[in-house]
Image: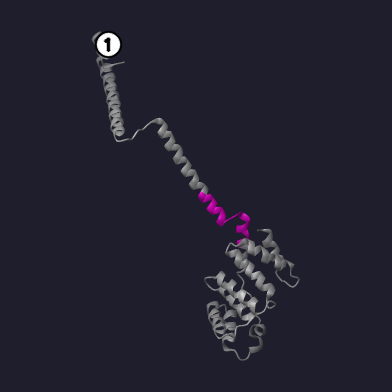
């Protein structure tokens, strides 16, 4: 219906004055909106921009694909960091095992130089008093003096684990040096604590191999714990 038709109906008395005013106002607004929309479309087209339903659908679909891709990337990153609930459970178990420091035997710690090495004695005292940062300093002094034994490196690795801010990679480096000095000294313990360090660093495959070594060793005191950890990986 056009505005002229409304005027004709009003003149014939078909419409009341109030109804005619309302309908006429609505039609004028609608016509004005259509003219504005057409004007904007023409201006956009002059500038090389065309807004069609097909384009709107394309843009909407493209945005949906982008959003979906972001979600997938975030999910993949989360999975890489936390591969499974079991992996997280094993890491928590490893952290619990590391809460109680390994007790160093005085005679084993000092070795053949138990009465003469000042730094080794102070490192032992600091370690057993849970002053692990001090133990690290004393043991590193022995290393710098080129007198560190396999046991010294093992104790250094433990001190790195138990200090206020654990340094698991430094501990692994110390355990590696201990193996180079003597493959038999603290062999089972080094495998056990190295496995725990690798778990804390989320390097599960290496931890798995070391845990299996602990399980397979008849002399290991951590076979059952290693088995439980392996079952949770």
Within 10 Å of the Cα at label 1, are there few (<14), some (14-19), or many (20+) other Cα atoms?
few
- State left or right for residue 157 relative to residue 55: right
The image shows residue 49, relative to residue 176, as above or below, that is: above
Residue lying furthest left? 11
Q: Can residue 103 be seen in this view?
A: no
The spot of residue 21 in percent (x, y) is 25, 19
Residue at point 74% right, 70% down? Answer: 217
x, y percent for residue 67: 47, 44
Name the residue at the bottom extreme.
Answer: 116
Task: Assess whether residue 226 is covered by the magenta stretch.
Answer: no
**Residue at 59% from the left image edge and 71% from the top image edge:** 172
Give residue 181's quadrant in the image: bottom right
Q: Can you identify the residue that label 1 sits on?
A: 9
Measured as percent of width and height from the top left, residue 209 is found at: 67, 64
Looking at the image, residue 160 sits to the left or right of residue 111; the answer is left
Q: Is residue 186 placed above or below 116 in the rendered structure?
A: above
Placement of 37 over or under 208, stated as above or below: above
* Prevailing secondary structure class for the magenta stretch in the rendered image: helix
Q: Which residue is drawn at 45% across and 39% down?
A: 62
Identify the magenta region: 73-91
Quarter that holds the N terminus: top left
Mark 1 secondary-structure assignment: helix
Label total for image: 1
Task: Pick out the residue farthest to the right.
Answer: 218
Q: Give the vertical position of 209 relative to 110 (above or below).
A: above
Residue 8 in view: yes
Q: Residue at x 26, y 19 (%)?
A: 24
Q: Residue 77: percent from the left, percent from the top?
A: 53, 53
Point out the image quarter for the C terminus: bottom right
Rendering quarter of residue 91 = bottom right
């Amino acid at each position: 219906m056009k505005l002229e038709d409304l005027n004709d109906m009003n003149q014939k008395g078909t419409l009341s004055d109030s109804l005619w005013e309302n309908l006429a106002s609505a039609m004028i607004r609608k016509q004005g909106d259509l003219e504005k929309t057409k004007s904007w479309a023409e201006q956009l087209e002059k500038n090389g921009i065309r807004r069609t339903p097909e384009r709107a659908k394309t843009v909407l679909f493209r945005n949906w694909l982008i959003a979906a891709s972001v979600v997938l990337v975030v999910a993949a990153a989360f999975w890489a960091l936390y591969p499974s609930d079991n992996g997280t459970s094993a890491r928590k178990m490893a952290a619990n095992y590391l809460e109680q420091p390994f007790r160093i035997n005085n005679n084993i710690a000092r070795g053949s130089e138990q009465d003469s090495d000042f730094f080794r004695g102070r490192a032992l005292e600091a370690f057993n008093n849970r002053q692990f940062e001090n133990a690290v300093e004393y043991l590193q002094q022995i290393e710098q003096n080129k007198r560190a034994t396999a046991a010294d490196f093992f104790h250094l690795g433990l001190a790195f684990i138990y200090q206020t801010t654990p340094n698991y990679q430094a501990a692994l480096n110390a355990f590696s040096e201990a193996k180079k000095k003597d493959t038999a000294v603290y062999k089972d313990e080094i495998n056990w604590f190295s496995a725990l360090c690798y778990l804390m660093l989320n390097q599960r495959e290496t931890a798995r191999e070391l845990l299996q070594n602990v399980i397979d060793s008849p002399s290991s005191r951590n076979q059952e714990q290693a088995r439980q950890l392996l079952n949770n990986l």
